[in-house]
Each structure stands twice: as C-alpha cells, then as structure tokens.
Image (spheres, rainbow, N blue to C red):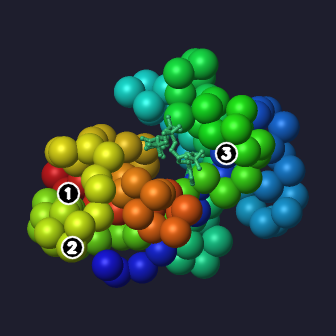
Amino acid sequence: MLKVEHIGIAVRSLADAVPLYEKLLNTPCYKQEPVQSEWVETAFFLQGETKIELLEATGPDSAIAKFIDKKGEGIHHIAFEVEDIFAEMQRLSAEGFVLLNEQPKRGADNKLICFVHPKNTHGVLIEICQEIRS
Ligand code: CMX
C-alpha cells in the first residue's frame, strides 16, 4: 500500500457539509461527483497529499444511508492507494480478509476501488484504490 489516499466521511447533506469543510480546511471543494452504482454523491477536498471525501446518500439502499441510520454521521472509511489493485486484492484474499467485491469497481475521482469488510479490520471499513490510467 502506498499511502492514505482519502478519508471518507458520511454526511446527511452535502449542501450543509461542503461549505462547512471549506471553512474548516480553508480550501475549496475541487470536485463534486455522483457514483450512481453506489447511490452516493461525493465531494472532494485536497489537504496536502491527503484527500477528504464527503459522501451523501442518494437513495435509501445506499451504504451511506444505512451507515448514518445505524451510527450517525462520521468517518465511514479509510482508503489506501495501491499500485496494482488486482495484485493487492489477491494478496488480501490470501491473507484471509473478506473483500466486498470480487472485481474492482469504478469509484469516484477516476479510481478503481475495492472494499474490505470492517468485521475483519477491527471495525474500520478499508478501501483500496488505484488511479485509472488511460
Ligand atoms: N465502518 C465500520 N463498520 C461498519 C460500516 C463502516 N463504514 N458499515 C457498516 N458497518 C458495520 C455495521 O454496523 C455492522 O456491525 P454490527 O454487526 O456490529 O451491527 C456490520 O458492519 C455489518 O453490517 P451489516 O448490517 O451486515 O451490513 P451492511 O448492510 O451495513 O453493510 C458493508 C456493511 C460494509 C458490508 C457495506 O456498507 C458495504 O458493502 N460497503 C462497501 C461499499 C460502500 O461503502 N459504498 C459507499 C461508499 C462508496 C464510495 O466511496 O464511492
């Protein structure tokens, strides 16, 4: 794993959370983007080398809606950048981690992504991600 690429924060409303994080971080949101397959709308901030991703649910079946119903707003996942997502998924599987998707999925911000079940990682949802190189 190369570095923490972003921290995902579940929010009820991007309309409320984006201006607040702009004030908090003293930097503008650089991208807002839907991920229709995940039923989320995302908003990104860059702070040094690390990104913050705010996530709002766009449907009741969204993982973000379920998370907020159960736990309230807050840190939803930590994403690590990897060089080769296929190799890293194979390695994690062989180490006994439960991957939440069999193939990498297309995520926000030009990434291939895969999630690791939080039950295996002491309660933290981990994402691995790789930049899509065209
Ligand atoms: N962090 C830590 N624990 C979490 C969690 C999270 N983000 N989301 C759920 N959990 C916990 C639940 O509270 C539950 O704990 P208990 O058994 O102690 O109650 C446990 O994980 C299993 O939950 P579940 O009810 O069986 O399953 P859910 O339907 O809540 O699904 C999860 C949980 C992680 C499998 C599902 O949310 C998932 O597949 N996530 C990956 C995809 C995703 O999160 N997409 C949104 C972001 C997309 C993006 O970044 O673009």
Picture residue at 79% right of the left edge, 55% below the top: 21
As rendered, which of 104 and 97 lies closer to the eye? 97
Is 51 left, or right, of 23 in this rendering?
left
For disc 3, the marked residue is 10
N-terminal-most mark, 2 or 1: 2
**Residue count near mark 2 (Cα–Cα under 10 Å), binned few <14, some 14–19, many ≥20:** few
Amino acid type indicated by mark 2: Glu
Looking at the picture, how far across and down is residue 8, in whole percent? 58, 55
Picture residue at 58% right of the left edge, 19% below the top: 59
Amino acid type indicated by mark 3: Ala
Query: Is 21 situated above or below 19?
Result: below
Pointer 3 and pointer 2: residues touching (CB < 8 Å)? no
N-terminal-most mark, 3 or 1: 3
Using the image, tell me which numbered label, if any, was put on residue 96: none
Q: CA distance from mark 3 to mark 1?
A: 28 Å
Is 13 left, or right, of 121 in this rendering?
right
Of the 4 image quadrants, the one containing the N terminus is bottom left
N-terminal-most mark, 3 or 2: 3
Mark 3 CB near ligand 1 (8 Å cut): yes
Looking at the picture, how far across and down is residue 77, in whole percent? 54, 57
As rendered, which of 84 and 68 lies closer to the eye? 68
Query: Is 25 situated above or below 37?
Result: below
Q: CA distance from mark 3 to mark 2?
A: 29 Å
* Label 2 secondary element: loop
Amino acid type indicated by mark 1: Arg
Using the image, tell me which numbered label, if any, was put on residue 95: 2
Q: CA distance from mark 2 to mark 1?
A: 27 Å
Indicate the quadrant where residue 73 lies. top right
* Label 1 secondary element: loop
Picture residue at 29% right of the left edge, 56% below the top: 98
For disc 1, the marked residue is 133
